[in-house]
Image: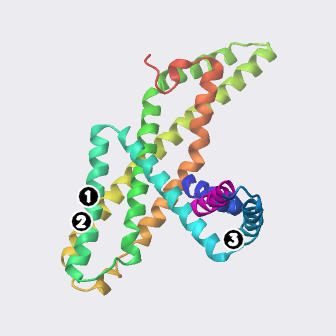
Amino acid sequence: MADLAKYERDLQRFQSSYMKEAVKEPFNFWGLAGFAVAAAYSQSIIPLLIALIAEIVYIMVVPNLPYYRQLVQTREKQRLLNANRTAREKLIKTFTPREREAVEYLRWLKEKIQDNYKKFTGAGSLPSNLRTLDQRWEDFVDLLDVYRRRKQHLKSINRQAVHNQLSQAYRAAENAGSDEKTRRIQQTNVEILKRRIASFDEIERSVKLVEGQLQSIENFFSYLNDEIVTMSTPEKFSLLDFEQLSDSIAMTKQMLDATADDVGALDSYNRQMGNYELLPGSNS
């Protein structure tokens, strides 16, 4: 979802700081320290002047070397991947025992599929489509997090209270009589409440869609686990359709992005109106 875009933005920002990275390199630090020791030992400023000249040349040359830039980018990519992996593991720890069990089972199944592929086909490495199972597992974790939060949001919404408010607004508009101002205010209130109920429905549909997507990922992993046992050559595995699941997940994430505003708007409206009992996490 937004994780990939954030990852790319972080990397682009980092690419503008090669000079800063070059300065922080251990070999640069120890080189300068060596010149400082030499200056102290010889009681001369010549080593310091040499160090200054060498540092200027170093800063001008090294950050612009293609090899060094590639090294820095590779190192930063790995750092970001490790940070994302750590964040995801922390996220998993916030899940309920049942949710963690589902996540860990799918992780185990993923590793079993990859191990069995090498075992039964005799291949030394995994094909590209099978390596995507790592991403599909991460998608499962991310979608499960969205699912649990939106489901909790729905549980926290007092839908009946909103329907009651709508009925009251309808009656107030009808009873306004010749008071045009009151009628217009209540009609506006009616439209707002109708949109809120429509937002509830959109969130409910998104929860059902994510639930179905989670089941699809689980079923696909189970299907692969069954198929891998009967596979004798890597060529057979390449015929399996991974794209359909990938496209389905992308569609689900797109829909979640489209309905994210509905979730935020509901919370914002309830806070503004003081309807704290309608907010997620309310005990009332």
Q: Which mark is residue 62?
A: 3
Task: Say whether residue 85 is visible.
Answer: yes
- The reply to whether discs 2 and 1 touch (Cβ–Cβ < 8 Å) is yes
Amino acid type shown at disc 2 = Lys
Q: CA distance from mark 2 to mark 1?
A: 6 Å
Front-lying residue, 15 or 149: 15
Amino acid type shown at disc 3 = Val
Q: Is residue 34 above or below residue 186?
A: below
Front-lying residue, 165 or 29: 29
Residue occupying image coordinates x 36% and y 72%: 130
Residue occupying image coordinates x 46% and y 25%: 281
Residue 101: x %, y % from top left? 26, 46
Instruction: Determine which residue is flagged by label 2.
Output: 112
Q: CA distance from mark 2 to mark 3?
A: 44 Å
Task: Residue 26: say if magenta.
Answer: yes
- Range of magenta residues: 25-41
Q: Secondary structure at mark 3?
A: helix
Residue occupying image coordinates x 75% and y 18%: 183
- Residue 199 sits in which quadrant? top right
Q: Is residue 53 above or below residue 41?
A: below
Instruction: Determine which residue is flagged by label 1.
Output: 108
